[in-house]
Structures are given as structure tokens and as C-alpha cells.
Image: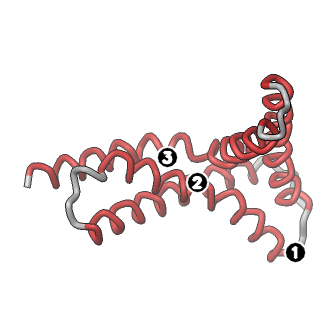
């Protein structure tokens, strides 16, 4: 019983941390993947880091550009999904990393991590909608 309460408390703490860091999930994932791809081609570290930073900034800029300029609701929905899906994955991974030893049931662990991922995705969507308020009215 104590481990279950500890897992719930650690999940709540991880969700609060993930709530505040959800907006950075897309650029961080793009940075890591771009860096590993470019660095694997025998490119120097600094060049790989600069290219990955440019790709991360470009990814966020592209999502915001689509949200501000697109009039097609399906395109806006896809842009929001591109922004939210990395946050869901990050929230799931954070809680799984914290609680995988505390929860013995595999089903309980998946439900707990899935709920945390969903909460983190909602946080990213709220943060993205906060950016949408900066757009000029059409």
C-alpha cells in the first residue's frame, strides 16, 4: 500500500513538472533526433549542435506559422497534433521512469503512465492555445 501511495505522489510531482515543461517537448525531440542523425554522418559536434538547434527552432516556427496563417481547420488540427504528440510521449516517459519500480501491475503502470501522458498533452495544448491568443484577429 505504501508503494502505491508513493507512486501516486511521484506521479503527481512528475505531472506538475511535465505540465510546465510540456511546451519544450517538440523542440527537444527535434533537436535530439536531428543531432543524432547529423552527428552519425561523421560531422563535428559543434556543426551538429548548430544544425539541430536551427531545426528545433524551425519546427516550432513552422507550427506557429501554420496556426497563425492557416484557414483550413484540418491543417490547424494537424499542426496542433504535431505539437502535442511529443508532449504526450514525454509525459508518459517521465512517469514511467519515476514509477516503473513502484507499481508491480503492468496494467496499472500503463494506465498511470497513459494518464500522465494525456495530462501532459493537455498542458501542451493549453500552452499552444496561449500562443494562439497572440495572433492578430482575422
Q: The residue tagged with tag 2: helix, strand or loop? A: helix
- In the foreground, 117 or 29: 29
Mark 3 surroundings: few (<14), some (14-19) or many (≥20) residues within 10 A: many
Mark 1 surroundings: few (<14), some (14-19) or many (≥20) residues within 10 A: few
Mark 1, residue position? 72
Q: Earlier in the sequence, mark 1 or mark 2?
A: 1
Q: Residue at x 85, y 31 (%)?
A: 43
In the picture provided, is 1 more to the left or to the right than 135?
A: left
- Please state the horizontal and vertical placement of residue 12, each as a whole percent of the image: 32, 48
Q: Is residue 53 above or below residue 26?
A: above
Q: The residue tagged with tag 3: helix, strand or loop? A: helix
Q: The residue tagged with tag 1: helix, strand or loop? A: loop
Q: Residue at x 72, y 46 (%)?
A: 33
Separation (CA) of disc 3 from disc 2: 9 Å
Mark 2 surroundings: few (<14), some (14-19) or many (≥20) residues within 10 A: many
Q: Which mark is residue 19?
A: 3
Task: Give the farthest residue toward the left.
Answer: 1
Mark 2, residue position? 87
- Please state the horizontal and vertical placement of residue 26, each as a whole percent of the image: 68, 49
Q: Residue at x 81, y 48 (%)?
A: 59
In the picture provided, is 120 more to the left or to the right than 10?
A: right
Q: Quadrant of the C terminus?
A: bottom right
- In the foreground, 2 or 75: 2
Separation (CA) of disc 3 from disc 1: 29 Å
In the picture provided, is 127 more to the left or to the right than 88?
A: right
Q: Nearer the viewer, mark 1 or mark 2?
A: 2
- Please state the horizontal and vertical placement of residue 100, each as a whole percent of the image: 30, 53
Amino acid at each position: 500500500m505504501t508503494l502505491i501511495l508513493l507512486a501516486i505522489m511521484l506521479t503527481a510531482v512528475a505531472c506538475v513538472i511535465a505540465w510546465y515543461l510540456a511546451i519544450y517537448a517538440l523542440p527537444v525531440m527535434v533537436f535530439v533526433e536531428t543531432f543524432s542523425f547529423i552527428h552519425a554522418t561523421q560531422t563535428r559536434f559543434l556543426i551538429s549542435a548548430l544544425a539541430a538547434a536551427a531545426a528545433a527552432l524551425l519546427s516550432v516556427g513552422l507550427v506557429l506559422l501554420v496556426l497563425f496563417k492557416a484557414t483550413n481547420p484540418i491543417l490547424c488540427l494537424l499542426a496542433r497534433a504535431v505539437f502535442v504528440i511529443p508532449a504526450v510521449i514525454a509525459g508518459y516517459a517521465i512517469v514511467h521512469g519515476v514509477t516503473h519500480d513502484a507499481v508491480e501491475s503492468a496494467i496499472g503502470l500503463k494506465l498511470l503512465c497513459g494518464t500522465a501522458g494525456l495530462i501532459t498533452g493537455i498542458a501542451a495544448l493549453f500552452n499552444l492555445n496561449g500562443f494562439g491568443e497572440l495572433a492578430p484577429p482575422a
